[in-house]
Image: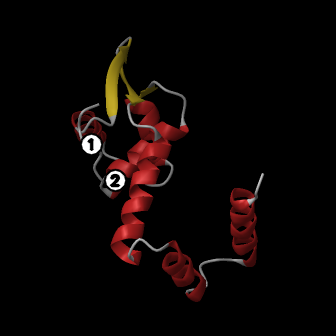
Amino acid sequence: MNKKLSRLPDTELEIMQVIWDHPTPISTSEVKAVLDEKRAWNIGALQTLLNRLIKRGFLESGKDGKNKTYTPLIDEQVYLAMENKSLLERLNGNSITKFVTALYNDDALSKKDLKDLMAFIESKTKVE
């Protein structure tokens, strides 16, 4: 893909999360059924957003009989890494310490979160 990866608006990200979380290819009606579990979606609006995701290079479409299907072209982890890096740069001066401190000070991290984070850091810094 030659297009630069760009940040997705919330509604498009919501659609991509459904597609990433389910076996693909996935049909329009299957995407809508999952989205409808949280709130009702207009099929026309959904199709417009799916077409936008195709144009942006996030999805490719195909056919399964009469059903239009979608397959992701961008891996979820690749997108999340880009978003996390951007968030860290924009809001925290590229400092993970500032980010964790802000979460801690706002009581957004539980003791379990801190223990998990400590275990992760220890596993990545062990000398082999």
In the current view of this chain or complex, which residue is farthest to the bottom?
A: 105
Give the residue type at disc 2: Thr
What separation in Å lies between label 2 and label 1 (alpha carbons)?
8 Å
Q: Taking 56 as reference, is 113 above or below it?
A: below
Percent position of residue 97, x then y: 54, 77
Front residue (pair 20, 115): 115
**Secondary structure type for disc 1:** helix
In the image, taking residue 11 as reference, residue 114 lies left or right, namely: right
Q: Quadrant of the N terminus?
A: top left
Under mark 1, the amino acid is: Leu
Image quarter for residue 2? top left
Q: Position of residue 89 (x, y in %)?
A: 37, 69
Q: In the drawing, does residue 125 fall left or right of residue 22?
A: right
* First along the sequence among labels 2 and 1: 2
Is any part of residue 126 visible from this angle?
yes
**Residue at the image position 41 percent from the left and 47 percent from the top:** 79
Estimate the x, y position of residue 43 in percent, counting from the top left: 30, 39
Whether 115 is drawn above or below 61: the answer is below
Identify the element where label 2 is drawn: helix
> What is the image's colouring?
secondary structure
Q: Which of the pair 32/92 is nearer the observer?
A: 92
Q: Residues within 10 Å of mark 1 (few under 14, many from 20)?
A: some
Name the residue that disc number 2 marks.
11
Asked whether disc 2 touches disc 1, contact meaning CB atoms under 8 Å apart, the reply is yes
User: Residue placed at 33% from the left, 37% from the top?
Assistant: 58
Residue 49 is tagged as: 1
Q: How many marks?
A: 2
Please tell me in which quadrant of the rendered image residue 31 appears. top left
For mark 2, does the 10 Å Cα neighbourhood hold few (<14), some (14 to 19), or many (20 or more) residues? Answer: few
| Residue that protrudes farthest toward the front in the picture | 128
